[in-house]
Image (cartoon, helix red, strand yellow):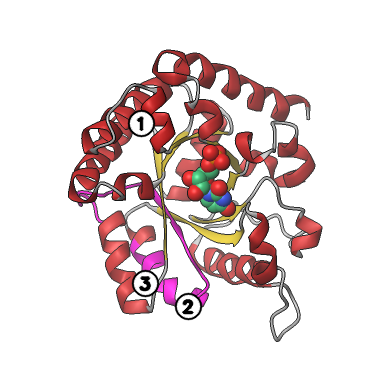
Amino acid sequence: MSFGERARAALAAHGPLCVGIDPHAALLDAWSLPQSGEGVREFGLRTVDAAAGRVAAVKPQVSFFERFGSAGYVALEEVLAAARAADLLVIADAKRGDIDTTMDAYAAAWFTPGSPLEADALTVNPFLGVGVLDGAFALASRHGKGTFVLAATSNPEAAAIQRARTAQGPTVSASVVADVSARNTADTADGEWGSHGFVVGATVDWADAGIAAFTPPAPILGPGFGTQGAGPADLRTRYGQAAPQVFASESRSILKAGATGIADAIVGAAEAYREALRHG
Ligand SMILES: O=c1ccn([C@@H]2O[C@H](COP(=O)(O)O)[C@@H](O)[C@H]2O)c(=O)[nH]1
């Protein structure tokens, strides 16, 4: 089954919430875990445990593991494997992007079945040109994996580059959405979701980003919920018709509940998003 269709099924079964696994230093302290590879391993595994069966997806933020070097990567490998074994879709947030041949090596790391870092999907950076991602799109599709291409990110600094106009007229964000959508269309049967989705932050005004005309039939990763200010109601107000395609990603706002409170925090947030979708 393609990643696009797996994403659609997971969202239909569990609703929009995607739990971010971001072991910030302050959160490790709050969870009484050490500042080490062992600390991020334990943090990640406990979060996976709390998320399993309750949400569609988890999104480990690779940087928080990477800061412990090889020990962090060993921990990340274990967290990825545990999440996949628990039937959670795993979106590795590593924002990879480089020239085509180098990008292909990143793709091999995250998409090859049996690779230590195997994930279901990876966030990728199109700002070296969408074309450099073609090898990654192809490898992902071959193995039922997917990508989330940065289109309109949640951070305020993004506007200066992403709202800029390309030589052809549309914004950079719109141009990314159009270019990736064309590849999905070429690669996907009629009526199916494409496997190459988009990062569009929950803080983003679609008209301002120049993407209001799009409802791309592909999953959308929506960070910016929770600590960055957006809430369940923004599923409808921001994403409109595309709301059922959104993985609403929250990290700190859920993780701050601590090791003992996280399961309840996930149950409550997951229901709030499902409710917003039903009645928004
Ligand atoms: O546009 C983007 C893309 C990715 N992120 C990542 O999502 C989480 C957000 O964490 P919160 O604690 O829920 O704010 C984090 O890993 C970011 O690197 C994003 O925020 N915006």
Whole-percent x and y of residue 242? 69, 46
Q: Does the magenta portion include 124?
A: yes
Q: Is residue 118 left or right of residue 259?
A: left
Label 3: state its secondary structure: helix
For label 2, the residue is 131
Label 1 with label 3: CB-CB less than 8 Å: no
Q: Is residue 140 visible?
A: yes
* C-alpha span from label 1 to label 2: 32 Å
Instruction: Tell me which residue sits at (24%, 44%) in the image.
Output: 72
**Residue closest to the eye, 2 or 27:** 27
Instruction: Indicate yes or no: mark 2 CB to ligand 1 under 8 Å.
Output: no
Q: Which residues are magenta?
A: 112-139
Provide residue 56's location: percent of width, then percent of height: 48, 32
What is the quadrant of residue 234 in the picture?
A: top right
Q: Give the residue type that dot 3 points to.
A: Gly
Q: Position of residue 42 (x, y in %)?
A: 27, 28
**Residue designated by label 1:** 87
Which secondary structure lies at badge 2? Answer: helix
Residue at point 42%, 24% (across, down): 51
Residue under label 3, please give it: 135
Q: Amino acid at mark 1?
A: Asp
- x, y percent for residue 160: 69, 69
How many discs mark residues in the rendered view?
A: 3
Tell which of 47 and 43 is nearer to you: 43
* Residue pictured at 77% horizontal, 25% vertical: 279
